[in-house]
Amino acid sequence: MFEDYLSWKPFFDIVPMTLDDCVEMSELHGQRFPRQWGDGEFQSLLLQGGVFGFVARQTNAFFSKPFGGFALSREAAGEAEILTIAVSEKFGRQGLGWRLMQAALREAHVRGAETMFLEVEAANAAAVGLYEKLGFRKVGERPAYYTGPDGRRSSALVMSRVLR
């Protein structure tokens, strides 16, 4: 019995994002990025045409349904982009980023996008590695694009993947 408890792992469903998710998305965004997007910013984006997203909700929790992460995207005129994606640190390295990205890629394709774009901090090796495994390739770089909490500037990689 005790061994079962030690081997317990959370299970997550990847479900379409709703306006009800905006507060939790804002909180997680603030934990993962230097500039937190407010829940009003997320609401405003979700109300725009072509914007869609997915959240990871734990399904085997006892008392609540912990929020594991989200991916927010937009599709327009045959192109899609990842606006932002975040996975909770406590659920990192469990494949949630992969699953959220797969959901966004599928939905973008269904909506008619032929290419998906994203920007990522060049120094974020884990994210760059994930995107490369998903088939994204570097198509550009924006020097000194991001400003960290310490004021240091870092480059953004622009990456894309063909969806056809």
Image: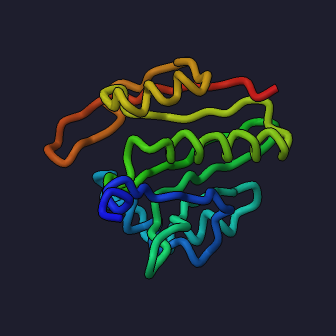
Horizontally, residue 154 falls left or right of residue 120, namely left
Residue 143 or residue 24, whichever sits in front = 24
Q: Give coordinates of residue 50: x percent, y percent.
A: 75, 55
Residue 27, horizontal then vertical, whole percent: 37, 68
- Can residue 39 be seen in the rendering of this structure? no
Q: Depth check: give the residue in front, 66 or 111.
A: 66
- Please identify the residue farthest to the bottom as the structure is shown: 63
Residue 122 in the image: above or below residue 53 = above
Indicate the quadrant containing the N terminus: top left, top right, bottom left or bottom right.
bottom left
**As displayed, is residue 10 above or below residue 119?**
below
Q: Please report the residue visible at 55 percent of the width from the left and 72 percent of the height from the top.
A: 21
Question: Which residue does the image show at 49% across and 49% down from the upper left?
Answer: 85
Residue 66 lies, with reference to residue 11, above or below; the image says: below
Here the colouring is rainbow
- Image position of 83 (left or right of 145): right
* Quadrant location of the C terminus in the rendered image: top right
**What is the residue that sits farthest to the front in this orientation?**
1
Left or right: 57 as drawn, with respect to 157: right
Depth check, front residue: 42 or 85: 85
Q: Residue at x 74, y 46 (%)?
A: 75
Say if residue 25 shows up in the picture: yes
Residue 2 pos. (x, y %): 30, 63
Identified at 67% across, 45% down, the residue is 104
Task: Pinpoint residue 115: horizontal percent, then vertical percent.
Answer: 73, 30
Quarter where residue 54 is shown: bottom right
